[in-house]
Image (spheres, helix red, strand yellow):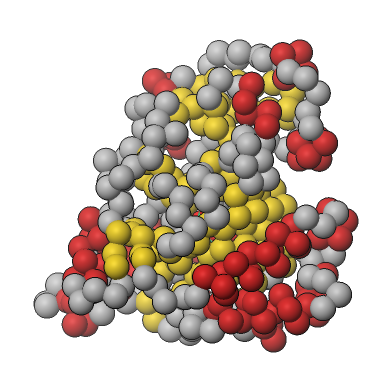
Amino acid sequence: MQSSLPKVSKPPLHFILGINRQEINPPLSPHAQKYSSIQSLTLQPKSLSLLHPKTKHITKKEMVVLSKQTTQQYSYIKNSKSTTFFSGIPMIDLSKPDSKTLIVKACEEFGSFKVINHGVPMEFITDLESEAIKFFSKPLSEKEKAGPPNPFGYGNKSIGPNGDIGWVEYLLLTTNPENNSVRLASALGKNPEKFRCALNEYTSSCEEYGLLNYYPPCPELEALNGENMIGFGEHTDPQIISVLRSNNTSGLQISLRDGNWISVPPDHRSFFINVGDSLQVMTNGRFQSVRHRVLANSLKSRLSMIFFGGPPLNERIAPLPSLMKGEESLYKEFTWFEYKKSAYGSRLADNRLCLFKKIAAS
Ligand SMILES: C=C1C[C@]23C[C@@]1(O)CC[C@H]2[C@@]12CC[C@H](O)[C@@](C)(C(=O)O1)[C@H]2[C@@H]3C(=O)O
Ligand SMILES: O=C(O)CCC(=O)C(=O)O
Ligand SMILES: [Fe+2]
C-alpha cells in the first residue's frame, strides 16, 4: 500500500538544515502557537525522496520539507509552481446540451472538472458560508464541544483516525440532520436550526455527508522562502463523487496523470467535481479517482464545503454492466460498507483501491 507522503514521525536519514524558527522569525502569532510550536525544519531533497518507496509520487519539481515539532508535525512542500494556476481544467456549463458528453470526457481525461450554471442559488451557498464562519470564529473550547469528528463533528489538525495532520479545522456532517448528534447541534449555536436550515437547503439533493473545512491563514509561511504547508494532505476521495465549493482563496491542487501537481484557480461561484474511488470501480477504471490536496495560505483563510455522494452501506460496488461489453471486472466484489471500513483503517495518502484490485498493482 502506498503510504502518506511527508508525515513521518522520524527525522529523515539525510541532511538536516536545522532552522530554528524561533531564531529566524518573530514570535508566532497566537493562532500559530495554538496549532504548533515549530522547532526545526528538515529538508528532504527530491533526489532522495524519489528513492524512497513511500514518496515515489512526489513530482520532480518539488522538494518535501518535514517539520519537526514538540507535539505535532505538519508537512511542508516546496513547489516552485504553487502560485501558477492551471488553466486547463475542464469547465462544464450545465445549461448546455453537450454537458453530459463533456463530463464523460473530463472524467476520463482528468478525473475532475468545474461546473458553472449549476442552478444552486448563490444565496444558499453564502448562507451556509456565513454560518460556517460564525462557527469557526468561536473560541476553541466552544468548538471542541462539537467534537470529536467520529463519526460526525468538529475536528482540528487531526484528519481521520490514523495520525494524519493538516493545517485545518473542519466540521464533518451527515446530510441527514437526524444523525448529527444533539451535542453537535447545540455546539453549533444557541439556535442550531438556522445552521441546520442553511445546510439542508443546500444539501437537499445530496447524499451521504458534507464537510466544512476551514484553513486559517498561516502568516509564518511568508518567512519560509516559498514553502507551502499542507492544509489537507494528498488523497483520493473514497465515495462516488465529491462536489466542492470554496471561497476565493487558493489552495486546492490536483495531481495530473503525469504526476505533476497543478493549482486549481479558486472560483466561489462554481463547483469543482472530483471522481471518487467508487466511481473508478463502477466504470471499471475508465474514470480514475483524482489525487488532490490543499495547501495553506499565508494571508487568507480558505473555507470549503464539500459534499460526498456515496452509495448505501450495503450496496455492492461493481462495474456497471452497461459499460462492460464482455470485459472482466478489474476489482474484487465488495460493498460500500467494506470499502469504508477499509478506508478508515488507512492513512490519508494510501491507495485504498489497491487492496480491492483483482491483480495486485506492480
Ligand atoms: C485518513 C482518513 C481521513 C478520511 C478517513 C481516512 O481514514 C481515509 C479517508 C479519508 C477521507 C478523505 C475524503 C474525505 O475528506 C473524508 C471525510 C472521507 O470520506 O475519506 C476523509 C476521512 C476523514 O476525514 O475522516
Ligand atoms: O478543503 C478542500 O478544499 C478540499 C478537502 C478535501 O479534499 C476533502 O476534504 O476531501
Ligand atoms: Fe478530498
Going by the picture, which residue comes out furthest to the left?
A: 326
Tell me if 134 is positioned left or right of 6 in this view.
Answer: right
Q: Position of residue 38 (x, y in %)?
A: 73, 27
Q: Is residue 8 above or below residue 348?
A: above
Residue 348 percent coordinates (x, y): 53, 51
* Residue drawn at (49%, 58%) of the image: 268
Tell me where residue 205 appears, x and y as whole percent. Answer: 48, 83
Q: Is residue 39 above or below residue 278?
A: above
- The residue shown at (50%, 61%) is 245
Q: Tell me what residue is drawn at x 30 percent, y 59 percent.
A: 91
Q: Residue at x 53, y 16 (%)?
A: 14
Give the image quarter of residue 166: top right
Location of residue 319 in the rendering, given as x and y in whole percent from the top left corner: 27, 75
Q: Quadrant of residue 181?
A: bottom right
Query: Can residue 47 be spotted in the picture?
Result: yes
Q: Is residue 289 left or right of residue 349?
A: left
Foreground: 102 or 293? 102
Nearest to the observer: residue 156 or residue 339: 156
Give 119 or 148, whichever is nearer the viewer.
Answer: 119
Q: Is residue 333 left or right of residue 294?
A: left
Q: How many marks?
A: 0
Asked if one can make out residue 336 in the rendered structure from this viewpoint, the answer is no
